[in-house]
Image (cartoon, rainbow, N blue to C red):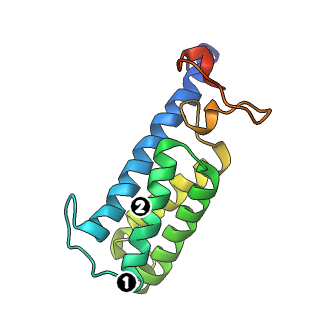
Amino acid sequence: MTQNLNARLNPQAPAVLSVFRIVVGLLFLLHGTSKLFGWPGGPQVPVGTWPYWWAGIIEVVAGALVTVGFLTRPAAFIASGHMAVAFFWQHLPGGFWPINNGGEPAVLFCFAFLLLVFTGPGSFAVESRRVAGGGVVTGRATRRGWRR
């Protein structure tokens, strides 16, 4: 039973990884836009405010890169570290457990980005359009055109 399930699901893993990357990247991007622009909700942080405004810059840039799948591993590494710092600086003083100190989103983002550091962007990413020889794949983005 599990072999049959694995055989059916394994070919879809790169595409599902791409969906995961896009969702995590968009959520992180929105986290940053709420700090920088007050959109889609939340208070806008004054320009240059340490560390919140600068955190918003990191979140917008890393979130955009991860969403489109360009420089995914370095962007995810920076985002993961950013969320680790956020947890230790902002949430840990309120207690050890993330459920009690409000640090659950920071922990989840940290480990989601850490996963992307090791797995890469998945099949549907700007990076996946590049050929190993340094060239660029041209033409329509068909199923065969994406590198697996």
Report how far apart the C-alphas of labels 1 and 2 lie in the structure. Answer: 15 Å
Residue extending furthest right? 133
SS at mark 2 in the image? helix
Q: Which mark is residue 5?
A: none
Look at the numbered disc 1 and give the secondary structure of its residue: loop
Q: For the point 58% across and 35% down, which residue is it?
A: 122
Asked whether the residues under the numbered discs 1 and 2 touch, taking CB atoms below 8 Å apart as contact, a structural biologist would say no
Q: Hey, which quadrant is residue 43 in on the image? A: bottom left
Task: Report crowding for label 2: few under 14, some 14 to 19, many 20 or more residues within 10 A (C-alpha).
Answer: many
Residue plotted at (42% across, 83% down): 51
Residue 6 visible in the picture: no
- The image quadrant where one finds the N terminus is top right
Along the line of sight, the residue nearer the viewer: 26 or 99? 26
**Residue displayed at 30% across by 70% down:** 35
In the visual, does 47 lie left or right of 38?
Answer: right
Residue 71 higher or lower than 86, as above or below: above
Q: In the figure, is residue 124 to the left or right of 32?
A: right
Q: State the residue position of label 2.
A: 60
In the image, is residue 125 above or below residue 53? above
Label 1 amino acid? Gly
Task: Find residue 111 and report its horizontal and vertical position in percent.
Answer: 54, 57
Residue 57 x/y as whole percent: 42, 69
The amino acid marked with disc number 2 is Val
* Side of 18 where 46 appears, left or right: left
**What residue would you read off at disc 1?**
48
In the image, is 56 to the left or to the right of 8?
A: left
Query: Residue 8's quadrant in the figure?
Result: top right
